[in-house]
Amino acid sequence: MRSLFVSLFLLFTGAITVKAQYDIIPMPQTVNIDAKGRMLTVDSALVVTDRLNSAISSPEGWRMTVDKRGITIEGSTTRGIFYGRQALRQILAPSNLPQGEASTGAATSPSWERQEGAKLPFATIESTPRFAYRGMHLDICRHFFSKDVVKQYIDMMALHGMNTLHWHLSDDQGWRIEIKSWPRLTQVGAWRDRTVIGRNMGLYDHTMYGGFYTQKDIREVVAYAAERHITIIPEIDMPGHMVAALTAYPELGCTGGPYEVWPDWGVSDDILCAGNPRVYQFLTDVLTEVMELFPSAIIHLGGDEAPKVRWKHCPRCQQKMRDLGLANEDQLQGYMVREMEKLLAANGRRIMGWDEIMYCDVPHNAIIMNWRDWKGVDDPAMQGFDVVRTPNSTLYFDFYQIPSSDWTNTTLIGGYSPLKKVYDYEPAPDTLTSEQQAHVIGVQANLWTEYIAYPELIEYQVLPRMAALAEVQWANPEQKNYEAFCQRLKRLLTIYDSEGWHYCRQGL
């Protein structure tokens, strides 16, 4: 009996050890290990083959076969094959080499034949993402980052199997995209003459700050993302968060100014004048150029944090409401959104907006980006909208990820969302009906940059929480286990290290 017990124990632990070599993030749905215990040695003769296979039902799903011929990665599309390749990067990461040996393969462009020494059990591995929309957001308005930093952000997303970058391109503190028909947007609106120090304490650095992307830059980044099967959704926030644009063109505001590119953080009362016909021409021109630059089927129109103080006292806005028979200023915002929706629809595009637009009588084909923790009937999925979940309490990666004795200090925006909280998030809870759950089309984390001025801090704030998010986006709820995730994370961290990416090590 003792001999049998020992044999079973060794068989069981051996199986765990073998399977652990395929413990990657996000976790595959199935890992079937060869029962005979056969192994593939990774050496200079390793063959990695891509094959399209129409039998794989998901356009982003993949299958990996490890056998005596080498490694075969299959997908019904090149996207699926790409995600399989990212999985292979982890499987062949340095932690999978014999102890004491180091990998010389570059993580961004894996050299499989140089990852010598790894032993891989024969296996078939399959994975399919749970959500079609798997996003990350980047704000480059509060602090501006070069196109190379954005490309690195895209590389991080690609490693984690994400497919959508939500690029926040305009705000009160800076307009960051060249619009040729309205050149002062970048000549004037891209630059602020000072920036508040800390949390709006009334102290400023009195240093000119800014930057923008030319249309050539935009096309370059869009192409870079497309090569990694990432779609970029541009956001032009309206009618609020427009002080930079108003500084460039004061006639677009209710008061006519004067305005300045906002040096503070927060929400300004100055927004676009909804009663001014020139505003609609401005938005038409801007969105027309945006659509020329971004092939995305979705365009984000913002719509959040738009105080109606100016509209309530603006003769033109009040007259517009009377002309249209509108009962209140929220309906006036809805009119503006619907006018832009017609423009986008005529060009085969669909609108997305923050959850405030739900209350502006927008068409139900709008995608709602759910940034507040709505529950019950306020949940946009219950209202029949397609929704992307990005709750600030959990998925704002500018929040702290380690405990802080003072969450009101000047280093970050505040809040606390540790790795486990991100991992445990459930976007489509069983409190929703199956029909309502189907409206939850994706999950995204946001990175706002009021207090993030350096690329290293971008890396630190999103890593390794991006790994936890990836598991939310790919894995089925019943498969998830936080302790197992933390073990699998160790292999992924070796890639972070090889790239030189900064990440939070607390608790790892």
Image: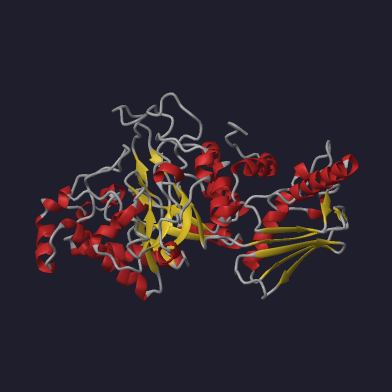
Q: Percent from the top left, x then y, of residue 491?
A: 70, 43
Q: Percent from the top left, x then y, of residue 3?
A: 90, 42
- Classify the position of the N terminus by image quarter: top right
- Classify the position of the C terminus by image quarter: top right
Residue occupying image coordinates x 34% and y 30%: 199
Residue 303 in view in this figure: no
Q: How many marks?
A: 0
Residue occupying image coordinates x 59% and y 37%: 503
Left or right side of 8 for 144: left
Who is closer to the viewer here, 204 or 397? 397
Q: Is residue 194 above or below residue 431?
A: above
The residue furthest front is 1
Q: Percent from the top left, x then y, of residue 501?
A: 62, 40
Who is closer to the viewer here, 73 or 188? 73
Who is closer to the viewer here, 330 or 275? 330
Q: Quadrant of residue 438?
A: bottom left
Residue occupying image coordinates x 34% and y 50%: 374
Left or right side of 360 for 323: left
Q: How is the image coloured?
A: secondary structure
Q: Percent from the top left, x then y, of residue 126?
A: 69, 62
Residue 126 in view in this figure: yes
Q: Is residue 261 above or below residue 278?
A: above
Left or right side of 80 for 286: left
